Image (cartoon, grey):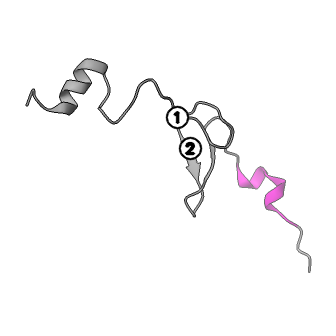
Amino acid sequence: MLDDPIIRSMEATGYPPWIDPDRVPRCPICGEECSRVFKDTYGDIVGCDECITECDAWEAEECFAEDDG
């Protein structure tokens, strides 16, 4: 088991071999370093934990568009 490349990598760097600790994820929308990104139903990234805030739909006036009739 000690010859497992994943274990060797974890012991040497603290990370599995598929993670490069010198690279950090950045949001493709705002460019900030982030830990989470959010995707729409089509799989497109719409923002991250740095550029998106959650709010209550009942408190967002934009959610109550006027009925045009």
Which tag is nearer the camera, tag 2 or tag 1? 1
Where residue 31 sits, quadrant-wise, is: top right
Mark 1: few/some/many CA within 10 Å (<14, 14-19, 20+) = few
Check disc 1 and give the amino acid type.
Answer: Pro
Prevailing secondary structure of the magenta residues? helix
**Quarter occupied by residue 47:** top right
- As displayed, is residue 69 above or below residue 58? below
Q: Is mark 2 in CB contact (under 8 Å) with mark 1? A: yes
SS under mark 1:
loop
Report the number of numbered marks: 2
- For this orientation, the residue located farthest to the bottom is 69
Report the residue marked by disc 2. Answer: 37
* Residue under the image location 53 percent in, 40 percent down: 36
Q: Which residue has dot 1 on it?
A: 25
x and y, in percent, of residue 58 in the image: 75, 55
Q: What is the quadrant of the C terminus in the image? A: bottom right
Q: Judging from the image, what secondary structure is the residue with disc 2 in?
A: strand
Segment tinted magenta in the rendering = 56-65
Q: Earlier in the sequence, mark 2 or mark 1?
A: 1
Q: Which mark is residue 40?
A: none
Q: Which residue of the protein is positioned furthest toward the top in this rendering?
A: 12
Residue 40 location, quadrant: bottom right
